[in-house]
Amino acid sequence: MKNLVSMKELSVEQIIAILEQAEAFRTGAASTLISKYTMANLFFEPSTRTKMSFEMAERRLPIDVLPFEAGFSSTLKGETLYDTVKVLEAIGLDALVIRHEQNNYFEELIGNVKPAIINGGDGTGNHPTQSLLDIFTIWQEFGTLEDKIVTIVGDIVHSRVARSNAQALTRLGATVQFVCPPEWQGEFETINSFEEAIETSDVLMMLRVQHERHDGLASFSKEAYNKSYGLTVDRERRMKDGAIIMHPAPFNRDVEIASELVECERSRIFKQMENGVYIRMAVIEMILKGRE
Ligand code: CP
């Protein structure tokens, strides 16, 4: 693996290898890289989890991380993403994590630049390391994804997390189903009964309502959305034994998930964030070793 831009390019064997290495980093069974690499994290869209956990992963490996702040970079003078990456190539960086608002921004980079490109999220397209950490969290919980029912609920059309998980979970044997308001369906096939899915799913993956990607949400009612599509305390009570709640976060409390469920016994939301560090360590190591 030379880059990671989408889940489509990962084989099941590669996904399993990443999970196993992440678990080895988690338990302390894996030793880390020698420190001969330099990376930077180029975030042109806001991020807390992805940016900070990549940086934690890089420091733990340990890898030198050069700071990059898009708001104080020559991007503001009109420098293109391609030209910025060429600058960092010239300076000697080995790999770049990039989050960008443009879908498939990486297409002009792969094959044309030397640093490895790790996609930290492109528009509404892909979020492969989020998908890997989601898979890792489910795998940790159940020991397998085979025959697990994963229901992804909410703002699917704007969700790179939903797209990346749709590309990967079924290949690992899970049944993936989608629930959302009709206007947020996009290319996804959805099921009609959220109420039935609550009782039959092993995983309820709630998605954030991405207000920033909606042209106008003047008619959006938090209360109405919560009533029809939110994970309320009453719905949580009807989840089956052992079923878990996930959310890529950040979350809108009391919109897609009741505030008191964020840290409830079934919630794996903060476990997902913790797992993000191990997954990103495994991905970075695999990519850099694949380039040696
Ligand atoms: N889940 C996720 O990508 O969160 P951030 O936007 O904070 O990175």
Image (cartoon, rainbow, N blue to C red):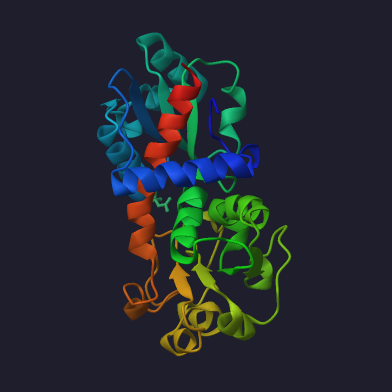
User: Is residue 113 among what the camera can see?
Assistant: yes
User: Is residue 122 among what the camera can see?
Assistant: no
From the top left corner, tell me how far across and down residue 234 is, in percent: 45, 90
Please name whichever residue, 220 or 92, is drawn nearer the observer in this view of the structure: 92
Position of residue 124 relative to residue 84, above or below, is: below
From the top left corner, tell me how far across and down residue 39 is, in percent: 35, 25
Among all residues in the image, which is located at the extreme front? 29
Name the residue located 64 percent from the left edge and 37 percent from the top edge.
Answer: 9
Image quadrant where residue 5 sits = top right
Q: State the quadrant of the N terminus.
A: top right
Name the residue located 39 percent from the left edge and 66 percent from the top edge.
Answer: 268
Position of residue 24 relative to residue 226, above or below, is: above
* Mark count: 0
Quick check: 162 left or right of 114? Answer: right
Name the residue located 40 percent from the left edge and 68 percent from the top edge.
Answer: 252
Please name whichever residue, 234 or 181, is drawn nearer the observer in this view of the structure: 234
Image quadrant where residue 146 sits = bottom right
Please name whichever residue, 175 or 152, is drawn nearer the observer in this view of the structure: 175
Position of residue 38 relative to residue 276, above or below, is: above
Name the residue located 63 percent from the left edge and 58 percent from the top edge.
Answer: 157
Position of residue 113 relative to residue 153, above or below, is: above
From the top left corner, tell me how far across and down residue 167 is, in percent: 65, 50
Quick check: 250 left or right of 164? Answer: left
From the top left corner, tell me how far across and down residue 75 is, in percent: 41, 26
Image quadrant where residue 112 sits = top right
